[in-house]
Image (cartoon, coloured by chain):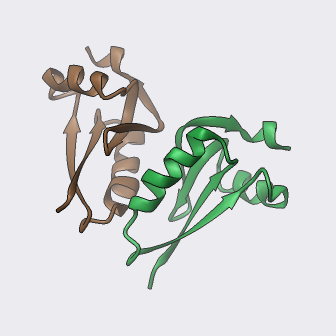
Chain colours: A green, B brown
Amino acid sequence: MATKAIFYHAGCTVCVEAEQNVARALDSNRYSVEVVDLGQQKSRIREAEEAGVKSVPALVLDGLPFHINYGAGLDALK
Amino acid sequence: MATKAIFYHAGCTVCVEAEQNVARALDSNRYSVEVVDLGQQKSRIREAEEAGVKSVPALVLDGLPFHINYGAGLDALK
């Protein structure tokens, strides 16, 4: 069964590059990747914070947050 | 044919976590991942810098650098 991976972004250039490269490079047989735009879905900012996400783009894999480069801090999205 | 991806690290805890999660989550049918410990292989620091790597852990995918969380700056490894 595929493990859920969540890629949080905010539509910025850095985010798009990370999504098109890192998020899409994951093994789809093992990971089911959900892409969440926190700029659009502000209701999910809390969930991202609870997973330890401090900035976007970030990938939450097996419950651990991995910040990929730096686009924007979560506070800028609130 | 698999594209080469290079994961640069320096043996730190942040690096090991990123390697065991992000680097190993890549689709091995599409990416052949080489893991380089810059703490041990200082001769490859220049190559990493030329790819745009500023800190470890970092993943270079299709020639683009993606910094994953933050372990150490490259200058600290010289």
Q: Residue at x 64, y 44 (%)?
A: A56
Which quadrant of the figure has residue B24? bottom left
Q: Is residue A28 above or below residue A20?
A: below
Q: Residue at x 78, y 50 (%)?
A: A39
Q: Residue at x 55, y 54 (%)?
A: A59
Q: Is residue A31 above or below residue B69?
A: below
Residue B50 image offset from top left, x and y in percent: 28, 23
Residue A15 image offset from top left, x and y in percent: 59, 45
Q: Residue at x 78, y 54 (%)?
A: A45
**In the shown orientation, is residue A39 left or right of residue B31?**
right
Which quadrant of the figure has residue A1? bottom left
Q: Nearer the viewer, residue B4 or A30?
A: B4
Q: How many marks?
A: 0
Q: Quadrant of the C terminus of chain B?
A: top left
**In the shown orientation, is residue A10 left or right of residue B32?**
right
Q: Quadrant of the N terminus of chain B?
A: bottom left
Residue A8 image offset from top left, x and y in percent: 64, 54
Residue A47 image offset from top left, x and y in percent: 74, 60
Q: Is residue B64 above or below residue B28?
A: above
Q: Nearer the viewer, residue A65 or B47?
A: B47
